[in-house]
Amino acid sequence: MRRIIYQSLAAPDLDRVEMFRLVYLIRAANETRGLCGFMLRIDERIFQVLEGEALKLTAAFESIRRDPRHRQIEMIDDRPTERAAFAAWRMRFFDGRNIPRMFAQITEAAGGDVPHSVQNAILDFLGPDLIRPVTEAVATPALPLLTEAAPPLSPRPC
Ligand SMILES: Cc1cc2nc3c(=O)[nH]c(=O)nc-3n(C[C@H](O)[C@H](O)[C@H](O)COP(=O)(O)O)c2cc1C
């Protein structure tokens, strides 16, 4: 298994409607390829975590890299992994409107064990301005993402 994390910038015509259309198609493609993960879009900035069998993921990422619907693709992290953390999601899409809820759902999907590389990459992507309201909103100092959360889900095939 392999997990990649990248960021990119949406093309101007990848508006809200086209984005939802794209996510719908991605879910079908990922079902076929056995890939999973999630995507976050804030304004024109896109962040994606994609997991799956190494050869299938490499092939998909070749297509993704060439896709004119986004540009300035930058790899944030690329590593082998024993199992998919987000096997529950063919491609979950977040629009960044409720970041605390997004953190909670990511934590739950990963069975309470969000890989550190994913945690760090999301926090970097969001930056201090988007994280500050979250840290101020929670009573405990840690973000939901960083705390012990739901008990592990039984592993599901990616
Ligand atoms: C931001 C973004 C994310 C994408 N994510 C995926 C993905 O997770 N899986 C996938 O199969 N295609 C994804 N695509 C679509 C691919 O670029 C491509 O259109 C699709 O895989 C079909 O390519 P093919 O005709 O070469 O098989 C994404 C495209 C964009 C713009």
Image (cartoon, rainbow, N blue to C red):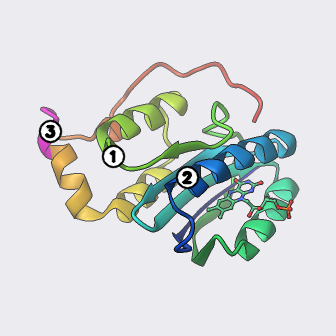
Give the residue number, with chain letter if any, for mark 2.
17
Q: Residue at x 38, y 39 (%)?
A: 103
Circles 2 and 3: CB distance less than 8 Å? no
Where are the magenta residues, as a range?
136-140
Instruction: Please state the total of marks drawn on the protein image.
Output: 3
Give the residue number, with chain letter if any, for mark 1.
97
Q: Is mark 1 within 8 Å of ligand 1?
A: no
**In terms of secondary structure, where does tag 1 sit?**
loop
Quarter of the image where one finds residue 3: bottom right
Give the residue number, with chain letter if any, for mark 3.
137
**In terms of secondary structure, where does tag 3 sit?**
helix
Badge 3 local density, few (<14 within 10 Å), some, or many (20+)? Answer: few
Q: Residue at x 53, y 45 (%)?
A: 93
Q: Residue at x 79, y 56 (%)?
A: 57
Q: Residue at x 57, y 76 (%)?
A: 74
Quarter of the image where one finds residue 79: bottom right
Q: From the viewer's perspective, is 153 left or right of 29?
A: left
- The residue mark sitting in front, 3 or 1, is 1
Q: Earlier in the sequence, mark 1 or mark 2?
A: 2
In 3D space, how far apart are the residues under numbered discs 1 and 2 (Cα atoms)? 16 Å
Question: x, y percentage for residue 52?
Answer: 76, 47
Q: Earlier in the sequence, mark 3 or mark 1?
A: 1
Circles 1 and 2: CB distance less than 8 Å? no
In 3D space, how far apart are the residues under numbered discs 3 and 1 (Cα atoms)? 15 Å
In this rendered view, identify the residue nearer to me: 43 or 16: 16
- The residue mark sitting in front, 1 or 2, is 2
